[in-house]
Amino acid sequence: MSRICIIGAGPAGTTFATRMAALGHETVLIERARFPRPCLGESLSAAVLPLLASIGAAAAIESAGFRRIESVERKWEADTEIRRDPHAEGLLVDRGVFDALLLENARRHAVQVLQPACVRECRRDAEGWNLRLQTPRGERRLHAEFLADARGRCSSAQKQTEPRTIAFYAYWGGPRLPSQPRIEAGEDAWYWGVPLPSGLYNTLVFADRSQARSMAKEFRERIMRSGLMRGCDDVHLVSPILAADATPRVHPDSVTPDSIRVGDAALAVDPLSSSGVQKAIQTALSGAIVANTLLRKPELREAALTFYRDSIRDASERHRRWAASYYAEVAATRDQPFWQRRAMKTAVPQAAMAVAPSPGVSLSLSREVEFVDTPCLEGDFVTLKTAVRHPTLEGPVAYLGGWELAPLLKTITSGMRGEQIALSWSSRIPLQSALKMTGWLSKNGILVESGL
């Protein structure tokens, strides 16, 4: 059994700790603040609850009485539109309560929690990590074989992936506040309104770091001019105007053989996506499998390190391109530097074009298909799987629709029609899945007309 120390008990830290404890590791979670404590990230995407189900926390979150997101008002490059979610799967949460529930879930899974406890020294030697903590009962020392950093955006080594962004925010009270979130593009900033379970309303302005001084002075006036307060009467501030760094960042060294960074400490995405908490939990879940592999299967160390580094880097780039495309929508009609700078480099690398073969023709595996070993998650470990590489794909593909792709492709005999290929796979996978896969493979040039 290895001792794991995690610094930081936000969603990433508690998720990582809970998963590591479930995998049988002695796990210590260190948090300097007392809970509950306020935190941004109060609007959660629909993917969060399924992720939390994997660590046994979904039921507690669902029963906490948080509000469901039924719709979002959006005024971006055009008129206001209302985007409705018929299933209302997103959540509006009090992050103080939300984080405390995840921490309690970690305790239920035998995670040892030290709170409040401040790390005064963290030193690595040949035997592992030595930590010196300050607690209300005095100084304490810990030794760990593996260290996880879940402290958020606190490392100067993080690489900035987009222009520096600052968020100014404050909470409002009143008898008639909005009941659903609203996002709005302003002249030189964008706005986000989040109604909370407590009845308060959080309003945020995201601006360029160079605008910080003017934004701090103009915050109240800007919020009242925006559509965030449309239809609101007799509103009043119930908090000071606060500020937080909102710059997207990525850490260039997200994992080593005896340490890992999860959540914002590894990858902080643009708040425009409203998926920061989701991404933090995802990195924690995959990071736990990586850490488990490093500790228990040292022969797969390089595969585990490569998998995590590549996944963090690729996620950062995907989010950057996605955010840039949304900023570009507004930049097309506004020449303000805020929009123009964030809309830069929107082009997505174009893969080679494929021409789908006609229905019913004989098919063969493209000559450009290569089979390569690539690290993948499988169960509780990172393993090497044979993946498919082709010019039309952004990267190697090991699984398609949840099924291993390479073993299926290796059974194809030249001259088979698409339905024959699907039938030949039906002993391994459902026929409907096989038919969908052959369609996708044809569309992407993996399967081509025989003789080409």
Image: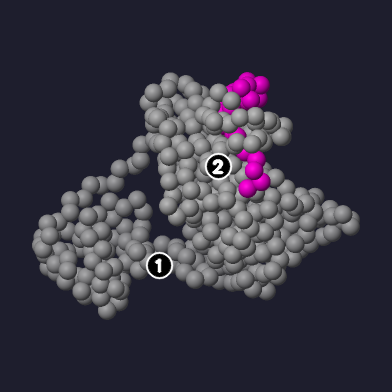
Q: Which image quarter is the C terminus in? A: bottom left
Q: Residue at x 71, y 66 (%)?
A: 107
- Could you say where residue 149 lies in the image, as x and y percent from the top left? 66, 53
**The residue under label 2 is which amino acid type?**
Ser
Which is nearer the N-term, disc 1 or disc 2? 2
Q: Residue placed farthest to the bottom in the image?
A: 427
The answer to whether the residue labelled 1 contacts the one labelled 2, judged by CB atoms less than 8 Å apart, is no
Q: Is residue 84 above or below residue 241?
A: below
Q: Which image quarter is the N terminus in? A: bottom right
**In the rendered structure, does residue 217 fall within the stretch colored magenta?**
yes
Q: Is residue 126 above or below residue 316?
A: below
Q: Quadrant of the rendered structure where residue 407 is?
A: bottom left
User: Can you see residue 116?
Assistant: yes
Mark 1: secondary structure = strand
In 3D space, how far apart are the residues under numbered discs 1 and 2 (Cα atoms)?
48 Å
Mark 1: few, some, or many residues within 10 Å (few <14, many ≥20)?
many
Mark 2: secondary structure = loop
- Could you say where residue 205 lies in the image, as x and y percent from the top left? 58, 31
Q: Residue at x 59, y 25 (%)?
A: 224
Q: Which mark is residue 179?
A: 2
Report whether 374 appears left or right of 229: left
Q: Quadrant of the rendered structure where residue 148 is?
A: bottom right
Q: Nearer the viewer, residue 197 or 365?
A: 197
Question: In the image, which residues are magenta?
Answer: 197-223
Q: Which mark is residue 385?
A: 1
Q: Is residue 183 above or below residue 61?
A: above
